[in-house]
Image: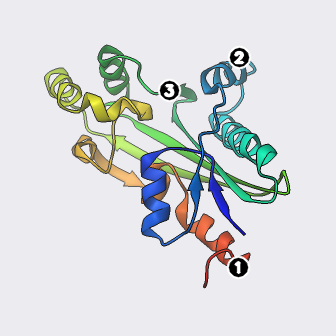
Amino acid sequence: MKLILASTSQIRQQMLTAAGVPFTAHAARVDEDTIRRALQAEHARPRDIADTLAEMKARKIAERSPEAMVLGCDQVLDIQGDVLAKPETPDEARAQLRRLRGQTHKLWSAAVIYHDAKPVWRFMGEARLTMRPLSDAYLDDYVTRNWDSIRHSVGAYKLEEQGSRLFSAVDGDYFTVLGLPLLPVLGYLGDRGIIPT
């Protein structure tokens, strides 16, 4: 049975490839911003926003390829119940980092698998990250040096790159921080015989 990743995220593709999982990737093309805003207007919890977005991505691809196993993923940054999205400008990135500094925030990484055009498995990973109380000058320089990369990430950082220097503590699974709860996904795929165990 083939696996389709309902995402063109490079880091998610790299994780699956490194783990030796055969898959193809297709962009789900859902309006994430509109969905997120609608859920926030309904006071949905950040973890539920991540789960809903992951499911909608999986469903979109599964409707076209019901015979496949389709993996949808999404990640939400939760700072005291507020959700941060990917920054649209360097100034927005700086504002996000200033809000996060000296604080502990959560990353919710949701994974939903569809088969036969219906959800058959889901998982929610949680990580807690504590950012150092960094100066404005340091954060400005960080954004200037890393903008091309961090503009694709919630919170305006990438832990796997220079973003690691922003943090004093990370509590949780590293793969969850990167946006895919890889170990539970591998466990499910192994149990179903999609990958050898």
Give the residue type at disc 1.
Gly
Front: mark 3 or 2: 3
Residue at the spot 37% in from the left edge and 34% down from the top edge: 103
Confirm whether residue 102 shows in the render: no
Q: Residues within 10 Å of mark 3 (few under 14, many from 20)?
A: many
Q: Quadrant of the C terminus?
A: bottom right
- Residues tagged 3 and 1 counted as in contact (Cβ below 8 A): no
Give the mark, 3 or 1, whose residue is nearer the N terminus: 3
- Which residue is at a point 30% across and 21% down the rendered structure image? 94
Does residue 127 appear left or right of residue 159 in this picture?
right
> Residue at label 1?
193
Q: Label 2: how many residues lie within 10 Å, few (<14), some (14-19) or many (20+)?
A: few
| Residue 175, horizontal then vertical, whole percent | 46, 58
Label 2 is placed on what type of residue?
Answer: Ala
- The residue that mark 2 highlights is 41
Q: Please say if 129 is above or below 135.
A: below
- Give the spatial CA distance, label 3 vs label 2: 15 Å
Residue 106: tell me if it is visible. Answer: yes
Residue 85 circle label? 3
* Closer to us: 97 or 6: 6
133 left or right of 176? left
Real-space Cα separation, disc 1 to disc 2, in angstroms: 41 Å
